[in-house]
Image (cartoon, helix red, strand yellow):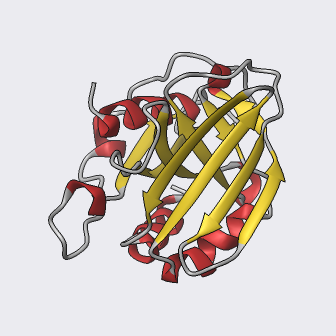
Amino acid sequence: MSGLLLITLLAGSLLGSADRPFERPVPCARSACQGAPVIAVAAPAPSSVWKFTRTQGAKDGESFAAIMKTADTTQSDPDFAGLIVRCAPKGKIDVLVALIRPFPPRSHPKVTIAASGGGTLTFDANMAAAGAAVLLPDEVSAFAAGKWQTTASLSVVVRESDSEIKGTVALNGLREAYNSLLANCGL
């Protein structure tokens, strides 16, 4: 299964699930998803595309948006899928690390993020989507809204007990994708 397809499926299960238990995603109504943009930058390589998705929520008329970027497979472990930035309830933005091999749903992994331009931060995180994604703390959304938009890539290490998953995500095109996400958050 391709990384972009897997991360798209994972994001569909994550959108709108911040305040609800994990459940099977409900497909969008045609009018709500029609014309949903895929954000692309000048370079045609697959790693340059931020995928935009919208998933209908559990309530009538409720929908959630997210942008996703798959991992650079040449610099990542096979169990590292990529990065998800999603609209969250109450006007928040969530940042998640998507994994292929899940951790236990109640675990609290340590996540270390190193920006290509310098700077390394370590966070305690929570699991989402039955352990297939790592929900980073709220303060990380400020990086996606600012500093990461001028950073070439992120190196991410997720540690839980004696297990470690490493990956790299190129951030080119994040500014445009993030702005598109914000424009679609309240819709």
Q: Residue at x 45, y 37 (%)?
A: 55
> Is 156 placed above or below 59 here?
below
Quarter assignment of residue 164: top right
Q: Is residue 171 left or right of residue 125?
A: left
Q: Residue furthest left?
A: 44
> Is 66 placed above or below 15 here?
below
Whether residue 16 can be seen here: no
Residue 158: x and y in percent read 68, 41
Residue 82: x and y in percent read 47, 45
- Locate the N terminus by quadrant: top left
Q: Residue at x 30, y 52 (%)?
A: 36
| Of 184 and 59, the residue lying toward us | 184
Q: Is residue 154 left or right of residue 121?
A: left
Q: Residue at x 52, y 38 (%)?
A: 61
Residue 73: x and y in percent read 35, 45
Whether residue 105 can be seen here: yes
Q: Residue at x 54, y 63 (%)?
A: 154
| Of 59 and 134, the residue lying toward us | 134
Q: Residue furthest front?
A: 162
| Of 42 and 180, the residue lying toward us | 42
Quarter assignment of residue 134: top right
Q: Is residue 161 left or right of residue 70?
A: right
Q: Is residue 50 left or right of residue 116?
A: left
Residue 167: x and y in percent read 51, 47
| Of 34 and 108, the residue lying toward us | 108
